[in-house]
Amino acid sequence: MHIAIASDHAARALKAALGEWLRASGHQVDDLGTDGDVSVDYPDFGYKLAAHLAAGRAERGVALCGTGIGISIAVNRHPGMRCALVSEPLSAALAREHNDANVIAMGARIIGIEMAKACLTAFLATEFGGGRHAPRVSKLGHPPGSQS
């Protein structure tokens, strides 16, 4: 699978470890930064990840910051992105199965590397369930009162 991954400074080490692990697992990984420990703004990297996926340059995304909250909000500002903040594998799997999430967000200050790997494994292995979930997911792109 082709996966894009991005983080702010607080999650750079987790991003590097997950990127290495994903590559070793046979995935193609686009590392969108950041690459250093200098303080950066998480929205910039969330927006970059969202644009990368929206352009079709990767199938799924991984968004990381200190808590995962800020970067998930940034990713979700982009139309077509369904970014789910998770901290355990069941939520990661259900985000795919029920919500067709295309990005997973995690917090480096919240989750350890082994749990992050477990979440990613569940996220990548789970397909969207469709069925009764499809009309609900469709509504996510067209809020009430919006023009379609």
Image (cartoon, rainbow, N blue to C red):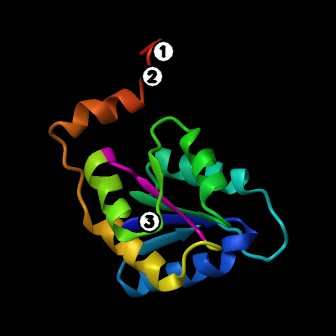
Does residue 55 appear anywhere in the picture? no
At horizontal 36% and vertical 69% (from top left) the residue drawn is 89
Question: Nearest the camera: 138 or 6?
Answer: 138
Which is in the foreground here, disc 3 or disc 2? 2
Residue position marked by numbered label 3 in the rendering: 3
Residue position marked by numbered label 1 in the rendering: 146
At horizontal 78% and vertical 56% (from top left) the residue drawn is 41
Q: Residue 79's x, y, as percent?
A: 50, 35
Do labels 2 and 1 touch, CB within 8 Å?
A: yes
Does residue 26 appear anywhere in the picture? yes
Residue farthest along the left direction in this orientation: 131
Regarding mark 2 in the picture, which secondary structure is present there?
loop
Regarding mark 1 in the picture, which secondary structure is present there?
loop
Regarding mark 3 in the picture, which secondary structure is present there?
strand
Residue 26 left/right relative to 20: left
Q: Which mark is residue 143?
A: 2
Q: Residue 132's x, y, as percent?
A: 17, 36
Mark 3 closeness class: few <14, some 14–19, many ≥20 residues within 10 Å: many
- Amino acid type at circle 1 is Ser
Residue 10 left/right relative to 55: right
Where the N terminus falls, by quadrant? bottom left
State which region is magenta.
99-107
- Amino acid type at circle 2 is Pro
Q: Residue 60's x, y, as percent?
A: 41, 58
